[in-house]
Structures are given as C-alpha cells and as structure tokens.
Image (cartoon, rainbow, N blue to C red):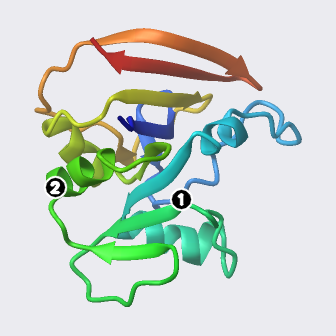
C-alpha cells in the first residue's frame, strides 16, 4: 500500500515560512551548493497533496509559469471553485476520504507538500506514515509553524538521517 510522506523543510525553530510567508531562506550553508534529497525523493512519489496557499505560492512565486511537478498528479485542497487541469485537481473532498482512496490505488507514494494546515489536519487524523523533515540552518523567530499545539501524541522511530550543506534531514516513521 502507498505511504503518505510529509517531505518538508523547516527552520531550526520549527517554521516553514517566515513572517512574510516567504521561503527564500530555505538553503544550506553554501548558496552555490544545491545538494539535496529532492531528486531521489520525487522519483518515489506519483501523487502530491497541498493546500491552496501552497499551490498559490508555487504558481506565483516559486515557479511562475513553469509547473514544477509535471508528471505527478496533484490534489489541491480548497473550497474555491476552480477548473481542474491535466495533472492538477482542485478538491474539497475530506482529507481522510481522499487519503484512504489514494492509498488504495496502485503506484508510488503520496507526498504531503504543505502547508501547515493540511499537515496538522493529517496529524490529527494520524494519516502520515513518514515524516521526512529537513532542518534548515536558520532561526526565524516568527512565521508559520509546522506543528500546531494540541496535536495528538504520535510515537515515531528514527529510520534515516542525512546531512548535506549544513542541513540535517531526519526521517521518522510511525511505531
């Protein structure tokens, strides 16, 4: 069965975006060093789930006019009535139902791309199988926290760790 994987970067103090909702600080010690686990990770998935705010940031800031996830079916969780595109489905389907349906399909894993609201809903539903988090060497002090207060306790075990360009990637699975 497919795994649901949170793959995301955060500051050392737990933020996924700064106070201005920017993510341009997400890099390692050497700005010229682009080493990361992204290329390997993206080969292991065939589905992306993201919220509308993350989608809006991707198409308007991070990758204007160049959808970076070609070949990967993307579900954007939103209440807005938007027209689906070839590989982008806008849906207000309940996350529990969507995840359960997608996990039963054949193929690769499911990437939870963001944002924090989607992540925390999935934590409360205990639907994330693997937490793959890259810690970026910066303390922001304010912004959008990855983890909200009052989430349920979920016991995890460390299954992998990697270090590159001053960043630490840790991977936990549910026990």
- Residue pictured at 52% horizontal, 52% vertical: 46
Where 137 falls versus 103 (above or below)?
A: above
Locate residue 79, reporting x and y percent.
21, 78
Q: Is residue 56 left or right of residue 102?
A: right
Total numbered labels: 2
Q: Secondary structure at mark 2?
A: helix
Where 54 falls versus 33 (above or below)?
A: below
Depth check: give the residue in front, 24 or 151.
Answer: 151
The furthest residue to the right: 32
Residue 140 appearing in the image: no
Locate residue 12, reporting x and y percent.
50, 27
Task: Give the number of the disc on residue 109.
Answer: none
Depth check: give the residue in front, 55 or 140.
Answer: 55
Closest to the camera, between mark 1 and mark 2, is: 2
The residue carrying pointer 1 sits among few (fewer than 14), some (14 to 19) or many (20 or more) residues within 10 Å by Cα, namely: some
- Residue pictured at 81% horizontal, 40% vertical: 34
The furthest residue to the front: 106
- Residue pictured at 60% horizontal, 71% vertical: 61
Quarter of the picture containing the N terminus is top left
Residue for badge 2: 97
Where 161 falls versus 14 (above or below)?
A: above
Task: Give the number of the disc on residue 22.
Answer: 1
The residue carrying pointer 2 sits among few (fewer than 14), some (14 to 19) or many (20 or more) residues within 10 Å by Cα, namely: few
Tell me whether circle 1 and circle 2 mark residues in contact (CB < 8 Å): no
User: Cα distance, mark 1 to mark 2?
Assistant: 31 Å
Locate residue 171, reporting x and y percent.
48, 20
Q: Is residue 129 left or right of residue 168?
A: left
Q: Secondary structure at mark 1?
A: loop
Quarter of the picture containing the C terminus is top left
Q: Quadrant of residue 151?
A: top left
Q: Is residue 34 left or right of residue 89?
A: right
Locate residue 99, reporting x and y percent.
26, 50
């Amino acid at each position: 069965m497919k795994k649901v994987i949170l793959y995301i970067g955060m500051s050392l103090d737990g933020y996924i975006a700064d106070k201005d909702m920017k993510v341009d600080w997400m890099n390692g010690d050497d700005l010229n060093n682009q080493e990361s686990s992204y290329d390997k990770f993206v080969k292991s998935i065939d589905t992306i789930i993201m919220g509308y705010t993350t989608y809006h940031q991707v198409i308007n800031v991070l990758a204007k006019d160049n959808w970076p996830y070609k070949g990967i079916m993307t579900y954007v969780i939103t209440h807005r009535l938007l027209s689906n595109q070839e590989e982008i489905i806008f849906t207000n389907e309940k996350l529990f139902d969507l995840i359960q349906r997608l996990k039963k399909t054949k193929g690769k894993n499911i990437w939870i791309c963001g944002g924090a609201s989607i992540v925390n809903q999935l934590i409360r539903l205990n639907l994330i199988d693997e937490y793959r988090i890259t810690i970026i060497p910066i303390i922001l002090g304010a912004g959008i926290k990855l983890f909200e207060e009052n989430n349920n306790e979920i016991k995890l075990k460390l299954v992998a760790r990697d270090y590159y360009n001053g960043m630490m990637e840790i991977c936990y699975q549910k026990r």
